């Protein structure tokens, strides 16, 4: 009796797994994932979760990148997104980390400029300027 029941359950499981349509895999390369993590669109992988990401997380990250780059936000890596990702840029993250503490009166939250002295020059003399 138990043996028959186990056999039926096993057969049902095999049929369900074999007959189920395969899930649609999105074409995200390791380079794309690294780019999204580098610039703050995806949280960095850790030892516990590894590279576990849902398709919705990846689409949202791509969509955020596309909105930041002012290209159509499709949520998929298309030619415009690839051009945006290979364009030269600085290494500063675009997105703020959700763990980052917000200051109450933050004027500029980006990187600070370490120069304290400015130099300037006037290249051409304008007629309306005084000579005094």
Image: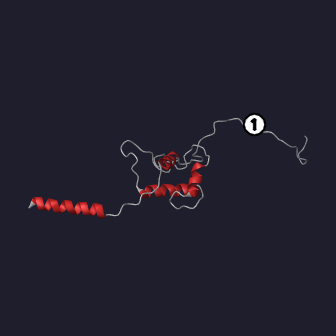
Above or below, comparing residue 62 to residue 126 in the picture: below
Q: Secondary structure at mark 1?
A: loop
Describe residue 112's horizontal placement relative to residue 124 as left or right: left
At 41% from the left and 60% from the top, the residue drawn is: 24
Q: At which x and y percent is residue 114? A: 63, 36
* x, y percent for residue 122: 83, 41
What residue does disc 1 label?
119
Taking 88 as reference, is 65 above or below it?
below
* Pick the front one: 81 or 114: 81
Tell how many labels. Answer: 1
90 sits left or right of 128 in the view: left
Picture residue at 45% right of the left edge, 45% below the top = 44
Task: Tell whether 3 sits left or right of 37.
Answer: left
Q: State the residue in front, 93 or 115.
A: 93
Residue at (38% x, 60% y) in the render: 23
Q: Nearer the viewer, residue 15 or 28?
A: 15
Quadrant of the frame with the N terminus: bottom left
Quarter holding the C terminus is top right
Q: Is residue 121 above or below residue 70?
A: above
């Amino acid at each position: 009796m138990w043996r028959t029941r186990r056999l039926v359950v096993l057969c049902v499981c095999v049929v369900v797994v074999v007959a189920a349509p395969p899930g649609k895999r999105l074409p995200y390369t390791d380079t794309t994932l690294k780019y999204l993590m580098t610039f703050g669109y995806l949280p960095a992988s850790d030892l516990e979760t590894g590279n576990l990401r849902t398709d919705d997380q990846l689409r949202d990250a791509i969509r955020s990148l596309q909105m930041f780059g002012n290209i159509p936000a499709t949520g998929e890596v298309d030619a415009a997104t690839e051009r945006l990702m290979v364009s030269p840029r600085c290494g500063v993250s675009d997105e703020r980390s959700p763990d980052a503490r917000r200051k109450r009166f933050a004027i500029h939250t980006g990187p600070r400029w370490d120069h304290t002295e400015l130099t300037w020059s006037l290249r051409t003399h304008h007629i309306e300027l005084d000579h005094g």
